[in-house]
Image (cartoon, helix red, strand yellow):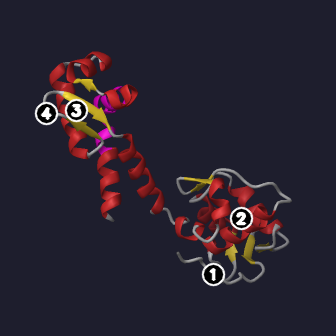
Amino acid sequence: MSADAAQAAEILTQLAVPVRLAAFTALAGRGTEGASLAEIAYAVDRPLPEVGDACARLVAAGIVTGTGNGFYRAQPSRLRDAAAAVDRLQPISALLDDYPQLRGNFAHGRLTTFPPTLSDRYSLLGELLARYLALDGLCAEDEINRRLATLTADVAGARRLMVESGWLERDRAGTTYGPGRPLPTVLSVEA
């Protein structure tokens, strides 16, 4: 696991405890103003020692800063950085670098929306999914579904998109699939 992923896991572990999540939420709601330990305890309706422990752990996780005299501020940018680190670990992330125009169709490594059927992005999404599947022969529908399920809840829609755009072919019974047209070579733009 990368250092970024380990940091993200630690942040999520700390926020999985209800009192810590409530304390972070209360602090985030206060913005850059922050809050005293007593104000946080009042806002989350928990005893002062419990909230003090929660804040200390959030400081250790790096998503809250403390002044040492019981005054704290949330650092939501650290939470966003952790989410971005987890996003970069998603299997589709490396492929999306070659398809920046499709980034809006994905959230946190998952396909959330399909482009309009007649748009250029529709076929481009089919190409991206074909690269992701990396088929080298025939596959049963269940295998295609299993692979696509790692990217989208609408497995049938993704499979249909690939067939309609020519990146995936199916037999007459609709139970076996294989690669459609050959994938073009993608030249990544280097900075």
Whole-angstrom CA distance, mark 4 to mark 1, is: 52 Å
Element carrying mark 4: loop
Give the label, 2 or 4, closer to the camera: 4
Q: Is residue 169 above or below residue 2?
A: below
**Residue where numbered disc 4 is placed:** 68
Q: Residue visible at 43% across and 56% down?
A: 86
The three-letter amino acid code for the residue at tag 4 is Gly
Element carrying mark 1: loop
Q: Specify which label sits upstream in the sequence, 1 or 2.
A: 2
Give the label, 4 or 1, closer to the camera: 4
Q: Is residue 152 above or below residue 97?
A: above
| Residues tagged 4 and 1 counted as in contact (Cβ below 8 A) | no
Q: Residue visible at 73% across and 54% down?
A: 114
| Residues tagged 1 and 2 counted as in contact (Cβ below 8 A) | no
Please report the bounds of the magenta region as a residue range. 13-26
Whole-angstrom CA distance, mark 3 to mark 4, is: 14 Å
Q: Specify which label sits upstream in the sequence, 2 or 3.
A: 3
The three-letter amino acid code for the residue at tag 2 is Leu
> What mark, if any, has residue 54 been given in the picture?
3
Please tell me whether the stretch drawn in magenta is mainly helix, strand or loop: helix
Whole-angstrom CA distance, mark 2 to mark 3, is: 44 Å
Give the label, 3 or 1, closer to the camera: 1
The three-letter amino acid code for the residue at tag 3 is Ala
| Residues tagged 2 and 3 counted as in contact (Cβ below 8 A) | no
**Residue where numbered disc 2 is placed:** 125
Give yes or no for residue 22 being in the magenta stretch.
yes
